[in-house]
Image (cartoon, helix red, strand yellow):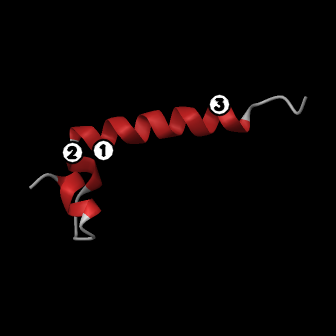
Amino acid sequence: MTEKEKMLRQMIYDANNDVDLIEERKVAKDLCYDFNHLRPS
């Protein structure tokens, strides 16, 4: 069972030990950065 599967099943998991979770976190950080730096117009 991958760490992501454990997370989705609400089990204890290590978020820093799964390549997929690390990559998804990078994408989420970039999306948050872009959203927070949008022009008000």
Counting residues from the start of the chain, the first of labels 1 and 3 encountered is 1
Q: Residue at x 28, y 53 (%)?
A: 15
| Residue 33 x %, y % | 63, 35
Task: Identify the mark at residue 18; answer none if there is no mark.
Answer: 2
- Judge left or right: residue 34 versus residue 2: right
Label 1: few (<14), some or many (≥20) within 10 Å? some
Does the residue at mark 2 contact the one at mark 3 (Cβ under 8 Å)? no
Q: Is residue 2 above or below residue 8?
A: above
Q: Amino acid at mark 1?
A: Leu
Task: Identify the mark at residue 21; answer none if there is no mark.
Answer: 1
Q: Is residue 32 above or below residue 17?
A: above
CA distance for labels 1 and 3? 20 Å
CA distance for labels 1 and 2? 5 Å
Counting residues from the start of the chain, the first of labels 2 and 3 encountered is 2
| Residue 4 x %, y % | 23, 52
| Residue 21 x %, y % | 30, 44
Q: Residue furthest left?
A: 1
Count of picture labels: 3
Does the residue at mark 1 contact the one at mark 2 (Cβ under 8 Å)? yes
Q: Amino acid at mark 2?
A: Asp
Q: Residue furthest bottom?
A: 11
Q: Amino acid at mark 3?
A: Asp
Q: Residue at x 23, y 38 (%)?
A: 19
Residue that label 3 marks: 34
Which picture quadrant has residue 40?
Answer: top right
